Amino acid sequence: MLALAERRVASRGPFQMPTGRPGVDQSHFASRNLLFSGVPFNSGFVNLLSGKAGTKNGSPTESIVSPLGRSSVVPGGGSFHGYTYTGQDATNFTSNTIAVIGSFNSIATTQYFFANNTNSNGVGINITSAGLLQWTMFGVVAVSSTITLVVNVPYFIIASKNGSTGISWLVMRLDTGVIVTASTASGTPNAGNGTYIVGNGVTTTTPMIGNLAAVMFSSAYHAPALLRQWAANPWALWYPGGRY
């Protein structure tokens, strides 16, 4: 397990960022088939699996953002803002899970949290200009959930794709603990190119306008009951042994 220097963040509600060192909890069920796990660190966004920061594009910054805690602030603006990671696994897995902890400062355009490619293929998770949460299989289909996000709310978001069978969604407000779930259809994506993007999408002009505190991507599916189990301790995968 990689562990970085400890950080301390004041309490921000029932599910605030814990104090302690970020790392990867290998005992957590969400670590199965983990392909990427990242948090903000030292003015960048570090892949905890490798200990390496992504290449910074545009002008994202690191800051303490209330009520999330340590976050990467992505300014948006239709430019290539975010972090890229080359040489990642480009296998076209039938199942995937993407989880994000973050918040939006504006919802007026399509905005991506994460994508696993830069060649208009692969998968990503985003919101529409109306705030509707989506799983996009680039060049194939964008699957909309029934969950709409709003500005200035800290969210824990999970989307878990079970092959071509369906997608399980869970969104929890970290300020109140209120959970919303959904189940939707799925599809079969095209393979990505092994370059992952945090805070933007494959066109590189659809950046998130907001704050990212944690992101993960795996090739495993997790059933709705497990997503609820994870929501009881949303930071656990990234902050093993963290104190609240």
Image (spheres, rainbow, N blue to C red):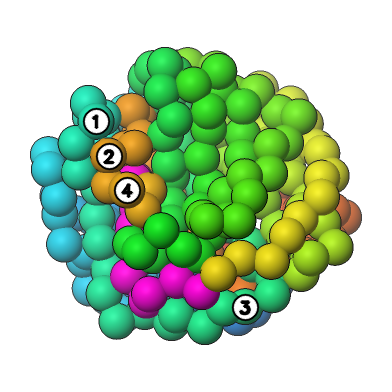
Which label sits on residue 78?
1
Residue 122 magenta-highlighted: no
Q: Nearer the viewer, residue 20 or 170?
A: 170
Residue at numbered disc 4: 203
SS under mark 3: loop
- Note whether 48 is above or below 142 in the view shown: below
Residue flagged by tag 2: what amino acid is it? Thr
Secondary structure mostly taken by the magenta-highlighted segment of the chain: loop
Q: Are marks 2 and 1 in contact (CB under 8 Å)?
A: yes
Residue at numbered disc 2: 205
- Note whether 210 is above or below 218 in the view shown: above
| Badge 2: residue crowd in 10 Å (few <14, some 14–19, many ≥20) | some
Label 3 and label 2: CA atoms lie apart by 26 Å
Q: Residue at x 43, y 41 (%)?
A: 112
The first of marks 1 and 4 along the sequence is 1
Label 1 and label 3: CA atoms lie apart by 30 Å
| Badge 4: residue crowd in 10 Å (few <14, some 14–19, many ≥20) | few
Residue flagged by tag 3: what amino acid is it? Phe
SS under mark 2: loop
Where the N terminus falls, by quadrant? bottom left
Which label sits on residue 93?
3
The first of marks 1 and 3 along the sequence is 1
Which label sits on residue 194?
none
| Badge 3: residue crowd in 10 Å (few <14, some 14–19, many ≥20) | some
The first of marks 3 and 2 along the sequence is 3
The first of marks 2 and 1 along the sequence is 1
SS under mark 1: loop
Q: Are marks 2 and 4 in contact (CB under 8 Å)?
A: yes
Q: Nearer the viewer, residue 172 or 81?
A: 81
Q: Residue at x 65, y 23 (%)?
A: 148
Segment tinted magenta in the rendering: 191-200
